[in-house]
Amino acid sequence: MSVRGRGATLPRVVAAEWTKLTSLRSTWWAALASVAASAALTYLSADASSGDPGYDPLGDLTAGLMLTQLGPLVLGVLAGTGEFSTGGFRTTFVAVPWRRRVLAAQTAAVAGFALLVAVASVVAAVLAILPAASSRNLPVNLTEGSTPRELAGMVLLLTGLALFGLAVGALVRRVVPALVTVVGLTLILPVVLTLAVEPGGSTFVEPGGSTFVEGVTPQETVVNTITTLLPSGAGGLLVTSSGAFAMPGAPDLGAVGGGLVLAAWALAPLAAAALRLRLRLRLEDVT
């Protein structure tokens, strides 16, 4: 790191962290995996469903979103654990004694890079539906209805998951445990919970937008509520229309509520990581 002591202002530390992040091949591989997964899975889904009567190409925009999430998660974890895995954090903290400033700069750098990756992944998804739409001579209008919100929600979801990965990585400081944690909470646990409970009711969306649930068991209510409050469930509310895909018995938080829950998943471990840095510094001062 080229910044030292009193010259280590936050903008200079952010610039240094950006340089470190973008100089790693693993960063670009994670970004490429995210864009490639988005393009490939969306294309396959659009191609498979293009022959259906009443086919709407915009309905396939989120088809590859589940696996696309893996790229930003890995990106964040590798950024959060990188220097602790190699021992480079010692050099960084000598150059910049304010450790929480380093963490803040790292967060800003990852957020900026993840935002670019998220936009590229969403653009890849849009391009992937064009061949299927062209084969049916269907227009693709990205400015009508809920499509703009859906596109923006996809970008925010992928960016938020990268920050979640960074936060857990910075707290745990080891690649494998951090990856197991974020992938388990985001991709595996929702599937396990869904498979563990048999559907016990039906959900009806009234014309006014309110949701009516009939015959939902208490167990299903608890499981669906937990699933909704997990990172992928909360982030998914950024993408879907309010009430349209509400899980039976679960609270419909809406886009704002889902975004706040996803932000909490990133901020809580990030705050814990900052506290761990502060406590470690105090212990070093005592010794």
Image (cartoon, grey):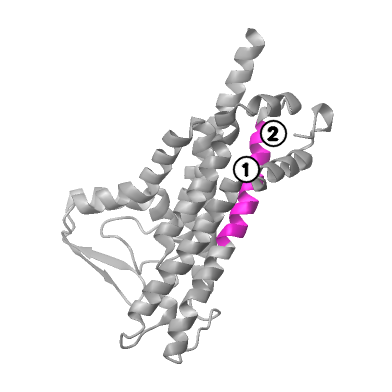
SS state under label 1: helix
Q: Nearer the viewer, residue 229 or 180?
A: 180
Whether tag 1 and tag 2 are in contact, CB under 8 A, the answer is no
Identity of the amino acid at label 2?
Arg
Query: Is the magenta region chiefly helix, strand or loop?
Result: helix
Q: Position of residue 123 (x, y in %)?
A: 56, 70
Q: Is residue 114 magenta?
A: yes
Q: Earlier in the sequence, mark 1 or mark 2?
A: 2
Q: Is residue 197 magenta?
A: no
Any part of residue 226 in sight: no
Secondary structure type for disc 2: helix
Q: Which residues are magenta?
A: 100-118
Residue marked by disc 1? 107
- Residue that mark 2 sits on: 101
Q: Is residue 125 visible?
A: yes
Rendered residue at 69%/41% (across/down): 17
